[in-house]
Amino acid sequence: MKPVKSTLLRTAVALATLALGAAAVPAVSQTARATAATAATAATAEAQWIDRATVVWKVEHTAATAEELRYAGGGTLRLAPAALTDAQKAAYPHLADRPAYRLDPRDRDKAATALRGPLSAVQRAVGDRDHVLHRTGVQIPGVLDDLYADRARRARLGPVFHGGRPTLSVWAPTARSVSLDLDGRTVAMRRDPGSGVWSVTGSPDWRDRPYRYRVRVWAPTVGKTVTNEVTDPYSTALTADSARSLVTDLADPRLAPAGWASLKKPKAVPLRDARIQELQIRDFSIADRGSAHPGQYLAFTDRGSDGMRHLTRLARSGTSYVHLLPAFDFGTVPERRSDQARPGCELAALPADSDQQQKCVARTAGRDGYNWGYDPLHYTVPEGSYASDPDGPARTREFRGMVQGLAHAGLRTVMDVVYNHTVAAGQDDKSVLDRIVPGYYQRLLDDGSVATSTCCPGTAPEHAMMGKLVVDSIVTWAREYKVDGFRFDLMGHHPKANILAVRKALDALTPAKDGVDGKSIILYGEGWNFGEAADDARFVQATQRNMAGTGIATFSDRARDAVRGGGPFDEDPRVQGFASGLFTDPNGSPANGGRDEQRARLLHAQDLIKVGLSGNLADYTFTDTGGRRVKGSEVDYNGAPAGYAAAPGDALAYTDAHDNETLYDALAYKLPATTSAADRARAQVVALATATLSQGPALSQAGTDLLRSKSLDRNSFDSGDWFNAIHWDCASGNGFGRGLPPAADNEPKWSYAKPLLSNPAVRPGCSEITGASAAYRDLLRIRTTEKAFSQTTAEGVRRALSFPLSGTGETPGVITMRLGRLVVVFNATPSRQSQTVPALAGAPYGLHPVQAHGADATVRTSGYERATGTFTVPGRTVAVFAAAGAAGR
């Protein structure tokens, strides 16, 4: 995700960082404006009406007090002290120790009426209705779920067509009235009292017409009844800039590119074997001179472009999925190209270490065509700025064309989905959910304010209808757009039950009934544990630990930090790790400590990497560098267990992603300044190999194999094309030296960045760029053709995988891994290293044929001495040796 630029939200990130130690705190989406407005205007609501009979409130009842709920027109619901049941405590663990009150049974039939207007909890003196001791607003999600969810869950919301006639339905149980604004004409809607759903059925000529709902509802954030004209949360199509929804049938053949119905996808790859390229749609093609559709969905149909040719090469080497950064409708980019601002400077003419590029880019950042898109507006409509025309059906047809183009290249499609927050809340004009059912879809804190631990208005998937929206939206993307996988942003802010409900719904999709095999769709996400939901405070979260054994993977930051060095938030970015020269090629930074400290940290990093190579298995046992026999769960990662997975596929390995510096930029900071471009390229391949050759799935940022740089920008969510574009043609460089990165997130590191950006030795040429990519593809090919890398069970990993030289005598900077018939030596040191495995003396090993006949001349100088079982590998090289006469896959 990307962070917002405000002091309040930066503080939230800092607090989360302290809570997590060096673990990855995700960057998060914006809107500071909406968050600030919500915080300023929200009325306090400290009472929580959790079901039709129960209110939880901090105030204590005494013999002299009476408690009640008051609603519009002078109505009163009487309350009596009570105790929460065990089931209620389990459903609301954060409220388990609070005072509870039971509604008088005689008043419970008034609940639905009370919920459709102003509502307050009052403690007053006994016998005196006007002597109010405490008054507060009331949080209502629990009682709304109790009253309406059973029936509302079964409703089909949004536009649904039967026999050519559309029915439009919206859930708005607290609304006083809802009508349809259909292309300027008001159409009445009918409310179902059992579900709270309003609906209307139209005629066939409604197809493709613009509409909004006109919702008259009490809005606590402004303390009055308002009439909101708002788009459909279940929109399937939109006009430009999301101004209106469209009555669109996604089954309409006009919305499909030629060949869509008969599209044959590449064979499904199980999650445990997935090798994933993460890319942003605009980054992919905006600088590709061979693309006829720069920055658009249709760029993926340009088979002859540099980008598509490179993706095809990766697919042939073993890459199986392309993971697209948010491609749903988001709220921070003008969708019409004519409305998008462009930097007005000659950026290419400025010095490599200048601060002028970032100043120029910043002046138009809020109005240009660039944003990562972690700011959802409509969850189930393709983003319009990537379409040739954002106004109407092109975005649907062209998104499908993109999926089709990737399939033709041999790749399946993963979507990055962001259901954990919205771009805005309250009465903001970009607030959709909260203007239809105020106070329901957003997660509220004890005082009734919207939770912003995600650094934007958080949603509450623990509430039935927000959870339903998540499931329904995912199923639509899978069935109507043939998406093959989903990556959940901040998945730890979802209940585990919600993510498992997604899995169940996908598993029910069949080729015969739905046109897709839902069981082949992969799921993974960010299982970070922080914020108001941390440590299962409100529900069992979808975190790293809790998702183990579900078949849904979580990103593992353990080996990532060990490989790169330090963590994402170090003040001194020169903290080294395994691949960046810790102890073996020190850079002189005092942040690395003395020699003894460096050696100890490096050896511990090697243990973390071994756990990562096992697939982060909790029960994988090996000898650590201290000589102890340990399980993965017993290796320390900043106070947490390094190993948490139950099976291969529970943990996703990576060394870089869109958040934080690219791998090349991280290594630029960390390797000694005198390191040559050739050695930087070799260090990059070593780092990539630790994820590529692991058990379980692995992800890399698109362009990382080409040494992609963002000119040291650690948070490029709004840094424009200048810093973000992928340069597929090595003659255009790798993106390094395009000026100092934007000040907002990088200025404290400028003193480190400036001498690097002006150092020609840090900037790679074509030989380094193409050589690193070819070496990476060779390793990828080995990973996807050798069966030993694809263990299906934890027991299989335990039998096949060992680290024969691990222990007190292990070489700092070198990991020797034995896997079935293979021996892999990861030599991160700058020098040639020999590793003797006595147990293999006499065994016939040789360099793997892929590397022996591959692109990297250096790895071909690796050697093996059969008599002693000694493997010799050049500096900054990963060599794979195979036993002669044993079959691979």
Image: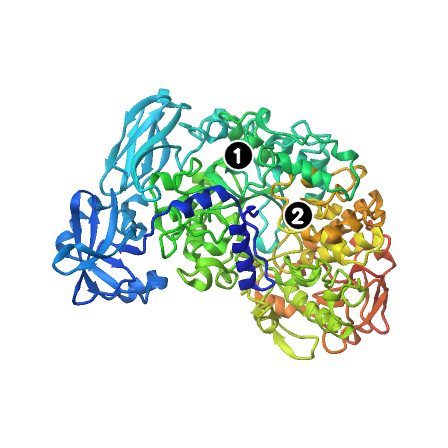
- Crowd band around label 1 with a 10 angstrom C-alpha radius: few (<14), some (14–19), many (20+): many
The image quadrant of residue 791 is bottom right
The earlier-in-sequence mark between 2 and 1 is 1
Three-letter code, disc 1: Glu
Taking the image as shown, residue 109 lies to the left or right of residue 29, namely left
Q: Residue at x 41, y 62 (%)?
A: 537
The image quadrant of residue 726 is top right
Can you identify the residue that label 1 sits on?
383
The picture places residue 246, in percent across and down from the top left corner, at: 42, 27
- Can residue 862 be seen at all in this image of the molecule? yes
Which element carries disc 2, helix, strand or loop? strand
Q: Residue at x 27, y 45 (%)?
A: 151
Which element carries disc 1, helix, strand or loop? loop
Taking the image as shown, residue 833 lies to the left or right of residue 514, namely right
Please state, as top left, top right, bottom left or bottom right, where the C terminus lies in the image.
bottom right
Taking the image as shown, residue 694 lies to the left or right of residue 90, namely right
Three-letter code, disc 2: Gln
The picture places residue 317, in percent across and down from the top left corner, at: 71, 47
The picture places residue 109, in percent across and down from the top left corner, at: 16, 49
The picture places residue 570, in percent across and down from the top left corner, at: 66, 60
